Amino acid sequence: MKARALISVTERKWMIPFMASSLVSFTLILAAVVSSNKSQKSNASLYDHLINGFRQSGIEDNSQLLTETQIVQPPTPSVPLAPKLAYLISGTKGDSHRMKRVLQAIYHPNNQYILHLDLEALPKERIDLARYVKLNPIFVDVGNVDVIGKANLVTYRGPTMTACTLHAAAILLKKGSDWDWFINLSASDYPLITQDDLLHVLSFLPRDLNFLEHTSDLGWKEVQRVKPIIIDPGLYLSRKSDIFWATQRRAVPNAFKLFLGNLFCTLL
């Protein structure tokens, strides 16, 4: 009996510390689990807060960048409309092929063209030039190239050259006055730049400009060009010949001021 009582007392002494340690361990484990859940929730909240902050910052940065780009970016300059040019290409006997060459070199669908072979050219040349224009599909489709059918007799350096230029300008104005500049060329001329480059340069210029070579400083030209009296046979003869000078001379006019220049010009 004494031995059993001793064993029972020993078991009771061992049980009490075991229960106490178990209770402490359970308490610690429970505290650890609760703390872990709170930490995860706190981390998740912090993560969401950081992500939202980054997103908002990115949106603000993008909007700010877009705003700065819109402010810094210069406005696109407006390109002015290209002008329309009216050309006179004139020639004489044997110039039909060279006139075609000039026409091909300066052709642009935005322009107007008129060709004139003077009365000295053979009828075959004039017909060949007219057929070339009529059978060209581009010229026919656009309709901006014409040939003067009633030719004029033109004398080089004579007033008939000016009369021919005025005749061609009158025809162009009758067809339409929507062109900006008139340019007269001969069959021996050839462009140094393309029509696109020329139209681009002229598009930035005022439309009321004329390009003339002129001077009021007569100098030696007063004696050799102003005072002599010249006669142009093309005004009254049917065959072409050179101008000739009369023996008489005239005084320099004082009712107006004389200017000398070049026949080839660009007029509005």
Image (tube, rainbow, N blue to C red):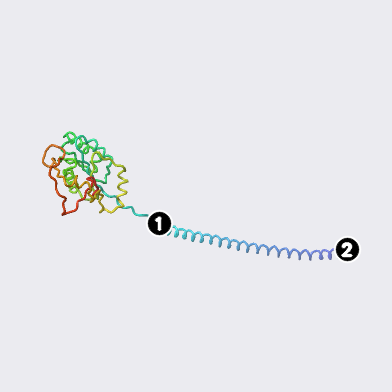
- Circle 2: element type: helix
Q: Left or right? Give the position of 205 relative to 43.
A: left
Residue shown at 31%/49% (left/top)? Answer: 201
- Measured in 3D between alpha carbons, the distance from the residue under mark 1 to the one under mark 2, in whole angstroms, is 107 Å
Q: Is residue 105 above or below residue 47?
A: above
Residue 22 at x, y percent in the picture: 74, 63
**Residue 16's image quarter?**
bottom right
Q: Amino acid at mark 2?
A: Ala
Residue 103 at x, y percent in the picture: 25, 40
- Circle 1: element type: loop
The residue that disc 2 covers is 3
Q: Earlier in the sequence, mark 1 or mark 2?
A: 2
Whether residue 157 is visible, yes or no, is yes
Q: Left or right? Give the position of 117 relative to 45.
A: left
Q: Amino acid at mark 1?
A: Pro
| Nearer to the camera, 264 or 40 | 264
Residue 189 at x, y percent in the picture: 26, 40
Question: Viewer-nearest of labels 1 and 2?
Answer: 1
The residue that disc 1 covers is 74
| Nearer to the camera, 178 or 55 | 178
| Nearer to the camera, 35 or 203 | 203
